[in-house]
Amino acid sequence: MSLYETEKIFVEQVEYDAAFDRVFQIRQSVFVEEMDVDHEDDYDGFDHLAYHYLVHFNDQSVATARWRRTQTGGRYRIERIAVLKDFRRKKIGSFLVKAILNDIPKDKEIFVHTPVWSIPFFKSLGFKESGFEFEEAGINHKKLIFG
């Protein structure tokens, strides 16, 4: 099912095995290989509880993300946003986050923990900074809340 579509970019929520192979390939490339995040930090045991998305650009899978209800407080967390290096700065991340925001119930807080360098990106989508910087997977992060 299409969630958000343009001439070149197609975002879908995925629930089939072949798509999950691509989700994990993209995350491996971006997080583990490019950003040097430990494999176990990326595969945190929450994938089976999350809603996963793939972005296709000109029929090629180039980005992924997931969202889930947190175990404490029932808030909604958008996470594991990964866009392959050659496809950044093409508005793919914006399409992806907007599609996810379209699907998440609006009854609880929606937030991200994002590397500090991507704060301007999330602010452009309506997120606001919350709290202090912290380290996650060896990278300085900050919590941002939607709305």
Image (cartoon, rainbow, N blue to C red):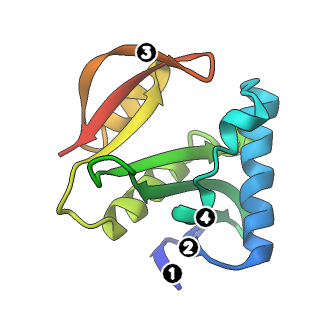
**Amino acid tagged 4:** His
The picture quadrant where one finds residue 44 is: top right
The Cα–Cα distance between marks 1 and 4, rounded to whole angstroms, is 22 Å
Residue highlighted by disc 2 = 12
What residue would you read off at disc 3? 134
Return the residue at label 4: 48
Choose the circle earlier in sequence order: 1 or 2.
1
Left or right of 58: which side holds 76? left
Label 1 sits on residue: 2
Q: Going 62% across and 40% down the picture, which residue do you hit?
A: 88
Q: Nearer the viewer, residue 40 or 72?
A: 72
| Cβ atoms under marks 1 and 2 closer than 8 Å | yes
In the shown orientation, is residue 12 left or right of residue 19? left
Q: Disc 2 marks which amino acid?
A: Glu
Give the residue type that dot 1 points to.
Answer: Ser
Asked whether 55 or 19 is in front, the reply is 19
Q: Residue at x 53, y 63 (%)?
A: 49
Q: Residue at x 72, y 25 (%)?
A: 35
Do residues under tags 4 and 2 come within 8 Å of each other at their CB atoms? Answer: no
Q: Report crowding for label 1: few under 14, some 14 to 19, many 20 or more residues within 10 A (C-alpha).
A: few
